[in-house]
Image (cartoon, rainbow, N blue to C red):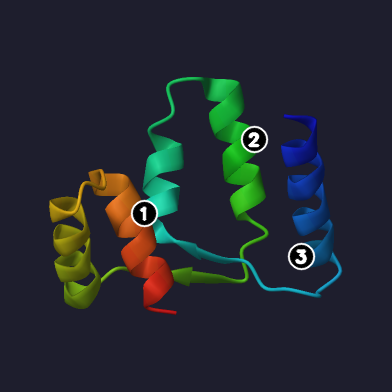
Amino acid sequence: MRAEAESVEQILRMIREGLVIWVSSAVLGLEVGRDPIADRRRCAEALLAFAGETVIPAAAEAERARDLQQHGFGAFDALHLACAESC
């Protein structure tokens, strides 16, 4: 768990320093907004502000997500992957 936290910190540092661009998606914003734990939701929403670009899923991403769901991915995971593939 510690290695994971350190990795996340390193990635966030790289984003702040402009070394990488965080490409998010509207799907992530929707998923974060559904978190029932208010403090965790607010922290995640604050992190989303660091995203340099946001992918809005369209028909192609929806179609790809349906295909991924047929291969066992859950709805949100399929949409996340479809949006990532479209970048």
Please give the label number shown on residue 6.
none
Residue matched to label 2: 43
Quadrant where the C terminus is found in the figure = bottom left
Q: Judge left or right: residue 82 versus residue 1.
A: left
Q: CA distance from mark 2 to mark 1?
A: 17 Å
Q: CA distance from mark 2 to mark 3?
A: 17 Å
Decide which of tag 3 and tag 1 comes sooner along the chain.
3
Which quadrant of the structure image shows residue 51?
Answer: bottom right
Which quadrant of the structure image shows residue 50?
Answer: bottom right
Q: Residue furthest front?
A: 71
Please give the label number shown on residue 27.
1
Callout 3, which amino acid? Ile
Callout 1, which amino acid? Val
Instruction: Confirm or deny contact between disc 2 and disc 3 (CB under 8 A).
Output: no
Callout 2, which amino acid? Cys
Residue lying at 16% horizontally and 74% vertically, measured from the top left: 59
Question: Element under label 3?
Answer: helix
